[in-house]
Image (tube, rainbow, N blue to C red):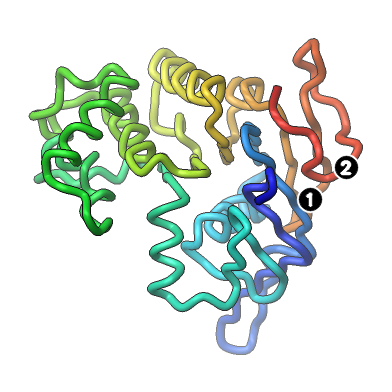
Amino acid sequence: MTNTVIELKGVNKSFRTAEVETRALTDINLMINKGEYVSFTGPSGSGKSTLLSILGLLDEATTGKFKISDIDVVDLSRDQRAAVRNKEIGFIFQSFNLISDLTVEENVMLPLTYQKGVSRADMKRIAAEVLTKVNMEHRMQHHPAQLSGGQQQRVAIARALVNNPSLILADEPTGNLDSENAAAVMDILKKLHDEGCTICMVTHDPRSVKHASRNIHILDGQIQNNLVADETGAKVAAVEEGAVPCT
């Protein structure tokens, strides 16, 4: 068992419409180690969200090799990919993606319902634990419409944590929030990282980038730079792709 959570080698992604082929990612080589906090930045259409979708097993690379937690996922069936995704990955989306007719508790419990052998009592206990982590345990029986945007995103973070995943993927987690709620969400992510969580985050917000230990800038589907934080917090060039873990 290695310390590597994500390993991509020569990953390419193309989309074909009629007779036109569009290359979204080109020759992506990337390693992310356990405990890292990585931000992906780049202009709209650069490929960063496509890359995050591939990391989250929501999409497949056209060519290349991909391992998550030492599992080679390239040749897995759809059901096998879903099982790995549910076990290894937690998602935080810009639009929260909470189900409106479920309570906060039920939204957080939902990923556990796809696991065999987890009792209802255990689901409720685990949901309460992760909601406590994000200070939302007092809203367990509320519905999403009864919550502010910041509160909904905290519930979404709790849902991402409920399976104790190897990797948390956040796609513009503060994109729909005001500055105060955005700062609160970033503080939660920083605390989770300090506790050992591995986080990959797509963001346009330079304030969010400052929280990450490594920033990867993507342009036209290619990695342009790979910067890690030195002891002062400034970003400097990494010596080796993926070689610098979080400290």
The residues bearing labels 1 and 2 have C-alpha atoms spaced at a distance of 13 Å
In this rendering, position of residue 76 left or right of residue 118: right
Q: Which residue is mark 1?
A: 223
Q: Nearer the viewer, mark 1 or mark 2?
A: 2
Tag 1: amino acid: Ile
Q: Is residue 94 above or below residue 193?
A: below
Residue 80, percent across and down?
43, 71
Residue 51, percent across and down?
61, 56
Viewer-proximal residue among 185 and 168: 168
Residue 51 in sight in this render = no
Tag 2: amino acid: Glu
Residue furthest right as drawn: 239
Q: Quadrant of the C terminus?
A: top right
Q: Is residue 165 above or below residue 125?
A: below
Q: Residue at x 47, y 62 (%)?
A: 58
Q: Quadrant of residue 205?
A: top right
Q: Residue at x 68, y 43 (%)?
A: 3
Mark with earlier residue (1, 2)? 1
Residue 87 in sight in this render = yes
Viewer-proximal residue among 96 and 22: 96
Q: Which residue is mark 2?
A: 240
